[in-house]
Amino acid sequence: MKAVSRIWTGLIGLALVSPLGLLASGDAWGEWGREFFQKALGFIPEGLGRLSDVWNAPLPDYTLPGIGEVPGYIISAIVGIGLVAAFTWLMGKALSGNSTSSKN
């Protein structure tokens, strides 16, 4: 159980320092859109051009309408962390056979 609590402690620590990303300039790694590739490469890769409209983020650019950039970023992070934590907890319960006994 100590390993699990260390993992959660580490994840919480990462979540707490994630707002430091607001201080960085440029795009976050892996969050490039069509415009980035057009500017960087001079063209849009075929697969990206074909599939770019398949998925639209529920909170695009980590903002919420009517809320500033920083509060929107923080709310988006909280929502994302909550969803990932809930999914992880549910999967853990499902994979452990829904055991209610505690194991140390």
Image (tube, helix red, strand yellow):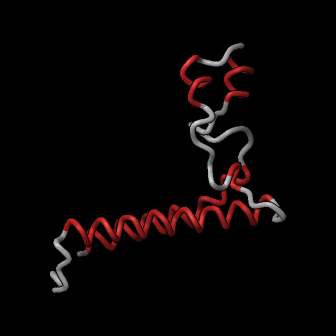
Inspect this view and state whether residue 75 appears.
yes
Place of residue 11 in the rendered image (x, y in percent of width and height, measured from the top left): 44, 64
Name the residue furthest top. Answer: 42
Task: Establish if 6 lies above or below 19.
Answer: below
Place of residue 92 in the rendered image (x, y in percent of width and height, measured from the top left): 27, 68
Left or right position of 49 against 67: left
Q: The C terminus is located in which quarter? A: bottom left
For the residue pair 29 and 53, the one nearer the viewer reads as 53
Inspect this view and state whether residue 104 appears.
no
Question: At 16% across and 86% down in the image, what residue appears?
Answer: 101
Q: What count of labels does the image hold?
A: 0
Left or right position of 48 against 23: left
Give the image quarter of residue 98. Answer: bottom left
For the residue pair 42 and 56, the one nearer the viewer reads as 56
Left or right position of 6 against 48: left
Give the image quarter of residue 50. Answer: top right
Question: At 69% across and 54% down in the image, what residue appears?
Answer: 62
Place of residue 20 in the rendered image (x, y in percent of width and height, measured from the top left): 66, 57
Question: At 66% across and 55% down in the image, what residue appears?
Answer: 59
Task: Establish if 103 lies above or below 15.
Answer: below
Question: At 60% across and 62% down in the image, what residue appears?
Answer: 77
Give the image quarter of residue 35. Answer: top right
Place of residue 1 in the rendered image (x, y in percent of width and height, measured from the top left): 23, 75
Left or right position of 56 against 14: right
Task: Establish if 33 lies above or below 89.
Answer: above
Name the residue furthest bottom. Answer: 101
